[in-house]
Image: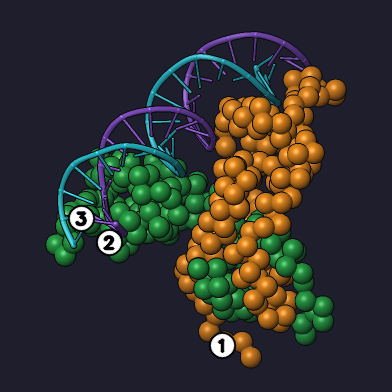
Chain colours: A orange, B green, C purple, D cyan
DNA sequence: TATTGTTATACTCTATAACTATA
DNA sequence: TATAGTTATAGAGTATAACAATA
């Protein structure tokens, strides 16, 4: 039976903040193990589908000029490549190379603390959590 | 009635990643509105209680040398102060000033996307979400 | 000897402003 | 004119290594 008094938003923010911190620290550790920064891991994970420089910057919520340096460094390491777009020649399409995709996949498959915590939940907890996270995620993505 | 087949950890990781991204982007926006970086906001929020340089670095999951520069910049802006510890004179105790505390409080109180999303949930959803986030958070905090 | 904090160094991340090329 | 991407620049975040002071 659910608690008759719904929790205030403040308590939820507090609790969510702790989860977010745990997730980010874990991502930093897994990325670092493979010689990547957290930002570089985010880029590679975003590049599961090709993106223009612009879309990538939007995904990262950063300035476009930032994306240039970010991608240049990853390109120098052979993890992504840039190609001029056919449709609109102002645009460049950034694609992860095979090495980049494989690295992103390995990092995503690690996240030991996050996966450990989720695996330690009961089946009922996992079943309850997923729709709530999905709902929160779609409300959050403006 | 709960779904008979509990969701795989992979789906939960995916969904959690989206929520985490939404939270971080929102924090960056609220912090930036007050002239702070995301990291600086994290420091000020952590300093709701005084911490040694060491503990602060651990909280941020970063090297101690990093904390020195971080705190130096915040100190130059009058948001925190450092004092030698009485008990152990190797240690320094970092405390948020009144200005620092007030700024942290304002940033925490904003987070418009996060609060908006949480407020848009039904009472039942909020009541279900809090214990799950608490549980995940304590499993995640190693 | 071990711990706490700092400095020096080098690299990455980040935004602003000014620029080129294309639409 | 507006958009996509880059460059130059400056500041912030980050780790490594070497160091001083204290325990």
Tell me the crowding category of disc 3: few under 14, some 14 to 19, or many 20 or more residues within 10 angstroms, Cα based: few
Question: Which disc is residue A82 wearing?
Answer: none
Determine if residue B109 is in view: yes
Pointer 1 indicates a residue of which chain? A
Residue marked by disc 3: B90
Image point (77%, 72%), residue name: B7
Pointer 3 indicates a residue of which chain? B
Question: Which disc is residue B50 wearing?
Answer: 2
* Quadrant of the frame with the N terminus of chain A: bottom right
Tell me the crowding category of disc 1: few under 14, some 14 to 19, or many 20 or more residues within 10 angstroms, Cα based: few
Determine if residue A60 is in view: no
The image shows residue A28 at horizontal and vertical percentages of 55, 51
Image point (67%, 31%), residue name: A77
Real-space Cα separation, disc 2 to disc 1, in angstroms = 36 Å
Secondary structure at numbered mark 3: loop
Pointer 2 indicates a residue of which chain? B
Do discs 3 and 2 share a chain? yes
Real-space Cα separation, disc 1 to disc 3, in angstroms = 50 Å
Residue marked by disc 1: A4
Are circles 2 and 1 on residues that touch, CB within 8 Å? no
Q: Is residue B119 left or right of residue A137?
A: left
């Amino acid at each position: 039976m659910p608690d008759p008094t719904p929790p205030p938003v403040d308590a939820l923010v507090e609790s969510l903040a702790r989860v977010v911190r745990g997730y980010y620290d874990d991502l930093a550790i897994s990325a670092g193990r493979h010689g990547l920064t957290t930002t570089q891991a985010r880029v590679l994970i975003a590049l599961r589908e090709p993106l223009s420089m612009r879309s990538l910057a939007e995904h990262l919520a950063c300035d476009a000029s930032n994306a240039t340096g970010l991608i240049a460094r990853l390109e120098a390491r052979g993890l992504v490549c840039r190609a001029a777009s056919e449709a609109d020649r102002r645009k460049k399409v950034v694609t992860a190379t095979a090495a980049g995709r494989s690295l992103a996949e390995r990092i995503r498959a690690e996240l030991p603390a996050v996966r450990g915590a989720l695996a330690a939940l009961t089946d009922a907890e996992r079943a309850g959590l997923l729709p709530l996270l999905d709902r929160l995620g779609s409300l959050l993505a403006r």
